[in-house]
C-alpha cells in the first residue's frame, strides 16, 4: 500500500467545484461496507477510477477514511472477492470452446 500513499496526482479544483468533489466523496462514504469492503450492493467492487478518486481525495484533503475505504476494498478483493465473482460468472455456462465443462 505504500506505493498508493506516494501518488502525486492531484484533483484539478478549477475543473470541478469543491462542492461536487465533497458530494462525490460523501456518496462513496455513505454506501461503504465497513465489514467487508466494497460499496453498496452488487456489484460490490467498484471500477478502478472510483478507487483512484478516493485516493486523490485522501491525498488532497488529508481524509484518512478515504484511504481506509480503498485499502479495505482492495484487501477484500484480494482475499477472495474476485475469485467468487469469476466462479459465479461462469457457473451457469455449461460448456466452453473445445469441450471444456465448467459446471
Image (cartoon, helix red, strand yellow):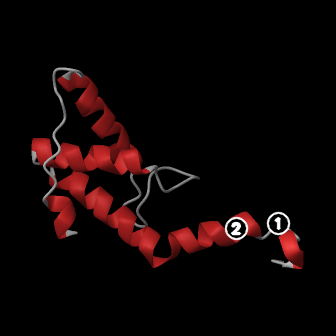
Label 2 crowding class (10 Å Cα cut-off): few <14, some 14-19, many 20+? few
85 sits left or right of 91 in the view: left
* Residue receiving disc 1: 92
Vertical arrangement, residue 8 with respect to residue 2, above or below: above
Q: Which of the numbered marks, if any, corresponds to residue 57?
A: none
- As rendered, which of 5 and 41 lies closer to the eye? 5
Quarter-of-image position of residue 73: bottom left
Badge 1: few (under 14), some or many (20 or more) residues near its Cα, within 10 Å? Answer: few
Location of mark 2 (residue): 88
Estimate the x, y position of residue 75 in percent, counting from the top left.
37, 71
| Residue shown at 15% from the left, 60% from the top | 5
Percent coordinates x, y for residue 14 in the rendering:
16, 20
Residue occupying image coordinates x 57% and y 74%: 83
Q: Residue at x 60, y 72 (%)?
A: 84
**Relative height, residue 15 to residue 71 (above, below):** above
Residue 72: quadrant of the picture:
bottom left
State the separation of the CA atoms marked 2 and 1: 8 Å
- Pointers 2 and 1 in contact (C-beta within 8 Å): no
87 horizontally vs 51: left or right:
right
- Looking at the rendered structure, the secondary structure element under dot 2 is helix
* Label tally: 2
Outermost front residue: 98
Compared to residue 22, the image places residue 4 above or below, namely below
The C terminus sits in image quarter: bottom right
Give me the residue at 46% from left, 51% from top.
Answer: 46
**Quadrant of the snapshot with the N terminus:** bottom left
Residue 29 appears at what percent x and percent y?
A: 32, 46
Q: Nearer the viewer, residue 23 or 10?
A: 10
Most foreground residue, 49 or 80: 49
Where on the picture, by quarter, is residue 70? bottom left
Amino acid at each position: 500500500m505504500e506505493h498508493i500513499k506516494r501518488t502525486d496526482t492531484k484533483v484539478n479544483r478549477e475543473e470541478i467545484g469543491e462542492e461536487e468533489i465533497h458530494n462525490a466523496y460523501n456518496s462513496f462514504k455513505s454506501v461503504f461496507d465497513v465489514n467487508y469492503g466494497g460499496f453498496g450492493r452488487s456489484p460490490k467492487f467498484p471500477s478502478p477510477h472510483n478507487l483512484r478518486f478516493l485516493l486523490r481525495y485522501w491525498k488532497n484533503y488529508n481524509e484518512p477514511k478515504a484511504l481506509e475505504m480503498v485499502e479495505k476494498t482492495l484487501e477484500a478483493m484480494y482475499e477472495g472477492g474476485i475469485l467468487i465473482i469469476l466462479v459465479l460468472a461462469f457457473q451457469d455456462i455449461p460448456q466452453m470452446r473445445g469441450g471444456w465443462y465448467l459446471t
